[in-house]
């Protein structure tokens, strides 16, 4: 069984920054991908950024240049640093671990006030 615990969401003004963290526990394989997805009201869940266990990264165009994903493999933790936040970044952010199956965190709300 795998558990993902997220932290770091909250309310921030436009132009501000937030750092999300997600710690995975349980049976974690050495080869996997961890990432962040988000879902705004009335919209589908979408990829924000992801990183493989070897450090390869992928970003949505909407956050490229404003966000950095990183991970600590020893702690099975992934981080998402988001800068220059915009109102359209407002969403529930979900941590994801992909290793044969997809595992999801409970979600953390990010609200950007304009």
Image (spheres, rainbow, N blue to C red):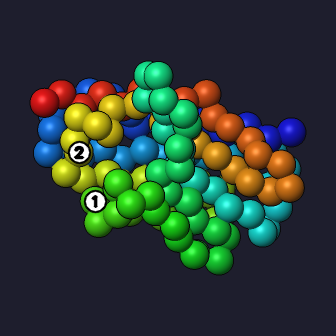
Residue 69 visible to the viewer: no
For the residues bearing labels 1 and 2, Cβ distance under 8 angstroms? yes
Looking at the rendering, which quadrant does residue 64 occupy? bottom left
Image quarter hosting the C terminus: top left
In the rendered structure, the answer to whether residue 93 lies left or right of residue 63 reads right
- Residue 26 % position (x, y): 81, 45
Residue 77's tag is none
Whether residue 88 is situated above or below residue 99 in the rendered picture: above
Q: Read off the residue under disc 1.
A: 66
Above or below for 9 versus 52: above
Cα distance between the residues tagged 1 and 2 = 8 Å
Labels 1 and 2: the sequence-earlier one:
1
Residue denoted by label 2: 85
Badge 2 element:
loop
Percent x, y for residue 113?
A: 18, 28
Which residue is pictured at 54% across the width and 33% down the height?
44
Does residue 103 sit above or below 53 in this rendering? above
Question: Counting other residues with Cα less than 10 Å from the Cα at mark 1, is it few (<14), some (14-19), or many (20 or more)?
Answer: some
* Rendered location of residue 56, percent (x, y): 57, 75
> How many labels were placed on the picture?
2
Local secondary structure at mark 1: loop
Q: Is residue 32 visible?
A: yes
List the single residue furthest toward the top: 41
Q: Residue at x 53, y 50 (%)?
A: 47
User: Is residue 61 rendered to the left or right of residue 78?
Assistant: left
Q: Quadrant of the N terminus?
A: top right
- Residue drawn at x 40%, y 37% is 8
* Circle 2 crowding by C-alpha within 10 Å: few under 14, some 14–19, many from 20: many
Q: Residue at the spot x=47%, y=51% of the render?
A: 48
Q: Nearer the viewer, residue 56 or 77?
A: 56
Where, by quadrant of the figure, is residue 76 drawn? bottom right
């Amino acid at each position: 069984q795998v558990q993902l615990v997220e932290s770091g969401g909250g309310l921030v003004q436009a132009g501000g920054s937030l750092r999300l963290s997600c710690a995975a526990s349980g049976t974690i394989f050495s080869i996997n991908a961890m990432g962040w997805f988000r879902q705004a009201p009335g919209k589908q869940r979408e990829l924000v950024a992801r990183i493989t266990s070897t450090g390869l990264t992928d970003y949505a165009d909407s956050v490229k240049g404003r966000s950095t994903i990183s991970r600590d493999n020893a702690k099975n933790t992934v981080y998402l640093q988001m800068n220059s936040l915009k109102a359209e970044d407002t969403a529930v952010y979900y941590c994801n671990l992909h290793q044969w199956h997809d595992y999801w965190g409970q979600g953390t709300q990010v609200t950007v006030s304009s």
